Image (cartoon, rainbow, N blue to C red):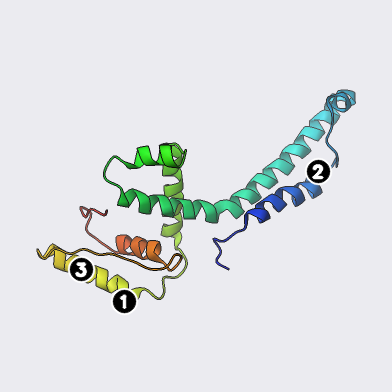
Amino acid sequence: MDETDVKETELKDLFKTVAKPLDAVGVQRSERQLAKLTLDERATFVREQILALNHIVDEAKRRGAPYAINVGRALLVTKAELRHGEFGTWIEKKCNLALSTAKLYMLHFDIAARRGLTKFVGRERELQQMHHALELAMSGRGQLIAVVAEAGTGKSRLYHEFKATTTLSKLEFW
């Protein structure tokens, strides 16, 4: 199983299991029960609950990172496929996501890519062919590259590696 294939149930289980050892009280307190506590006891209760919550949030971020990376990758590929100016409308209408949030996911992917994604293997020949097509296009011989394959075989990663290894800043990807 790929690191990015974290199961949704694992995240749900996290919220059930991680909080238990950190919940010093062990039960949910009603307003009446809280009112019976002294101010110092309530402060202790609040601190313990915040510690438990912070631990859950930190663990969820750690486990959720692969999802964020995948979302960012998918958004970057989609943005590259759409015409200039269409991405904002698409993301808001089709994904019900604010453009600013989409940019955060894409940034998450960019940061992960700069740190180093998993080793790029098995597509070196295709990457060379894409760079050769680019050289031909730059010499005035128009080129079109289409990457067609089964889902999950690395098309998006190949596209990312091609963009990352291309030194031409004015090159337009679509």
Q: Position of residue 60 (x, y in %)?
A: 63, 49
Q: Amino acid at mark 3?
A: Ala
Tell me what residue is drawn at x 21 percent, y 58 percent.
168
Q: Is residue 108 above or below residue 96?
A: below
Tell me what residue is drawn at x 29 percent, y 40 percent.
85
Tell me what residue is drawn at x 34 percent, y 66 percent.
148
Counting residues from the start of the chain, the first of labels 3 and 2 encountered is: 2
Could you tell me how far apart the alpha carbons at marks 1 and 2 are, in whole angstroms? 54 Å
Could you tell me how far apart the alpha carbons at marks 3 and 1 are, in whole angstroms? 12 Å
Q: Are marks 3 and 2 in contact (CB under 8 Å)?
A: no
Q: Which numbered tag is attached to residue 92?
A: none
Q: Is residue 140 above or below residue 62?
A: below
Q: Label 2 belongs to which residue?
A: 23
Q: Which residue is more in the foreground, 113 or 149?
A: 149
Q: Nearer the viewer, mark 1 or mark 2?
A: 1
Counting residues from the start of the chain, the first of labels 3 and 1 encountered is: 1
Q: Amino acid at mark 1?
A: Arg
Q: Quadrant of the N terminus?
A: bottom right
Q: Which residue is more in the foreground, 156 or 54?
A: 156
| Label 2: element kind | loop
Q: Position of residue 92 (x, y in %)?
A: 42, 37
Q: Label 3 belongs to which residue?
A: 133
Counting residues from the start of the chain, the first of labels 1 and 2 encountered is: 2
Q: Which numbered tag is attached to residue 125?
A: 1
Q: Nearer the viewer, mark 3 or mark 2?
A: 3
Q: Is residue 4 left or right of residue 102?
A: right
Q: Amino acid at mark 2?
A: Asp
Q: Position of residue 143 (x, y in %)?
A: 17, 64
